[in-house]
Image (cartoon, rainbow, N blue to C red):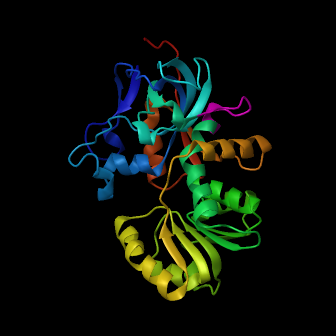
Amino acid sequence: MKAIMYNKYGTSEVLKLKEVEKPTLKDNEVLIKVHAVSVNSWDWELLRGKPFLARLEGLLKPKYKILGADIAGQVEAIGKDVKHLLPGDEVFGDISWCGWGGFAEYVCAHENALSLKPASMTYEEAASIPQAAVLALQGLRDNGKIKEGQKVLINGAGGGVGTFALQIAKLYGANVTCVDRAEKLNMLSSLGADHVIDYAQEDFTQKGQSYELILDIVGNRSIFDFNRILNPKGTYIMVGGPLHRILQCLIMGPLYSKTSGKKMTILVYKPNRNDQNYLKQLFIAGTVVPVIDKQYPLSKAADAVQYLGEGHAKGKVVIRVEHENVQS
């Protein structure tokens, strides 16, 4: 089979298309013929080995040679202990906790990572959902305890997590302010944002506005800035960002929580099939849908990763996996 592989940390130039053996099926796994896989910031971080936390499972060289966690495809074979899936089932899910490997024509995954794909959902849409949408859902609903009428700020709203977070927040009846690059603001307005801010033109921490709930996806401002615009008893949730910002939140967050009653914390993401299935129902209802900016063939996966890593993506970036003339 064909796969995009890398053997050392670096830029997208180290990603190479290679012929490799199909993965070996374990008893509790299914073999999936991949049709689409989306690119996430974790792929970018694992590729570069930055921040240093990205090297926890591979200090000098990557442990997983094939990136890609959010996959959609068709079950081709099942292990003897698999109970809920059958060959031919169309599935999607986040396989980061069971081995990665989605930038390939085939991948094996534990059945508990996978949800059945509805017929109305394309493979590209299905691959866009798992990490990004579940992160948004867990941040707003579980950590943020979002409520109707709240003023919510989403920092870095124009990417995969942010576009899902905006739709989910509006579903809950929140008043949503989105912060991102100028070229993404029209798209965010079309998704229902009540207010949009170009961070290059306006300092959203100095506008005199305050918020009950802040979802910080990019971590490009200090926790002190966010504390200034967070309402008393409000909640700030850091989804991602550079290591020094994460450490800052780990140190100062509990202090702010004790002294001011504000909750300032880091989201601990947990892949969750129940959340995937809940989001699937929202998709079927037409209330939360993926925003797909660009699609690339597998052979151009390096370009897809580079495009996302540079911060250009308006929503999700997806890699399509074609299977014509594939040798088993």
Front in this rendered view, residue 121 or 25: 25
Above or below, 231 against 115 in this view is below
Residue at x 75%, y 58% (from the top left corner): 171
> Where does residue 133 sit, x and y in percent of width and height?
60, 50
User: Magenta segment range?
Assistant: 115-125
> Where does residue 67 sit, x and y in percent of width and height?
40, 38
Q: Is residue 30 visible?
A: yes
Above or below, 27 against 175 in this view is above
Above or below, 220 against 134 in this view is below
- Residue 21 quadrant: top left
Q: Is residue 189 left or right of residue 30?
A: right
- Residue 317 quadrant: top right
Front in this rendered view, residue 107 or 144: 144
> Where does residue 247 sit, x and y in percent of width and height?
36, 71
Q: Is residue 11 left or right of residue 320?
A: left
Quadrant housing the N terminus: top left
Q: Is residue 275 left or right of residue 31?
A: right
